[in-house]
């Protein structure tokens, strides 16, 4: 019976030898493809990680650009600067007016001082003239007195 089983085994081996050979080639090819697939999956994983990192960087840059762009389009700082300039211009006008008032007051004070000096000088002149006239009159009196003395002779 063992010989019969051996004979059957040989018969089946010969008959299915082509299929066994084909099966081992296919099995070897499947193993090769599995290795290629595994390498491809590893490469895909690396590329996915790189893609994720690049995508994160892209999102960060996009947010940064959007924030800067919104800052560029935001005109509120410019409006505040213009308002500050207007306020400074109005303050300058007020100060110019104040300077004009002070200059006018100063000129008025100088004119008053000059007028007072002039009045003082005129009074002093009058006093000197009065004193000079008295002196001249007194001198004339003396002179007339001398003439009278002379005429009596």
Image: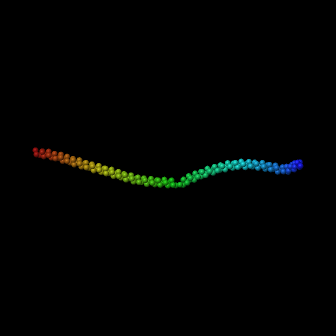
**Residue 139 coordinates in the image, percent (x, y):** 18, 46
**Residue 109 coordinates in the image, percent (x, y):** 33, 51
Outermost front residue: 1
- In the picture, measured across the screen, residue 125 lies left or right of residue 57, that is left
Please report the residue visible at 35 percent of the width from the left and 52 percent of the height from the top: 105
Q: How many marks?
A: 0
**Residue 24 coordinates in the image, percent (x, y):** 80, 49
Foreground residue, 130 or 87?
87
- In the picture, measured across the screen, residue 33 lies left or right of residue 80, that is right
Foreground residue, 45 or 140?
45
- In the picture, measured across the screen, residue 102 lies left or right of residue 123, that is right
Please indicate, yes or no, whether residue 7 appears anywhere in the rendered image. Answer: no
Quadrant where the C terminus sits is top left
Please report the residue visible at 85 percent of the width from the left and 50 percent of the height from the top: 12
Please indicate, yes or no, whether residue 138 appears anywhere in the rendered image. Answer: yes
Please report the residue visible at 63 percent of the width from the left and 51 percent of the height from the top: 55
**Residue 143 coordinates in the image, percent (x, y):** 16, 45
Q: How is the image coloured?
A: rainbow
Outermost left residue: 153
Q: Quadrant of residue 149?
A: top left
- In the picture, measured across the screen, residue 99 lies left or right of residue 51, that is left
Foreground residue, 112 or 71?
71
Please report the residue visible at 82 percent of the width from the left and 49 percent of the height from the top: 20
Q: Quadrant of residue 87?
A: bottom left
């Amino acid at each position: 019976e063992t010989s019969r089983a051996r004979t059957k085994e040989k018969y089946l081996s010969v008959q299915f030898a082509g299929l066994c050979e084909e099966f081992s080639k296919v099995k070897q090819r499947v193993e090769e493809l599995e290795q290629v697939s595994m390498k491809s999956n590893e490469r895909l994983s690396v590329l996915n990680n790189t893609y994720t990192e690049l995508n994160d960087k892209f999102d960060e840059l996009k947010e940064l650009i959007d924030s800067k762009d919104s800052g560029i389009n935001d005109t509120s700082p410019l409006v505040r600067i213009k308002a500050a300039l207007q306020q400074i211009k109005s303050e300058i006008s007020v100060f110019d007016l104040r300077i004009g008032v002070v200059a006018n007051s100063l000129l008025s004070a100088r004119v008053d001082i000059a007028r007072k000096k002039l009045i003082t000088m005129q009074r002093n002149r009058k006093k000197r003239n009065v004193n000079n006239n008295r002196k001249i009159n007194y001198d004339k009196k003396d002179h007339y007195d001398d003439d009278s003395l002379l005429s009596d002779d």
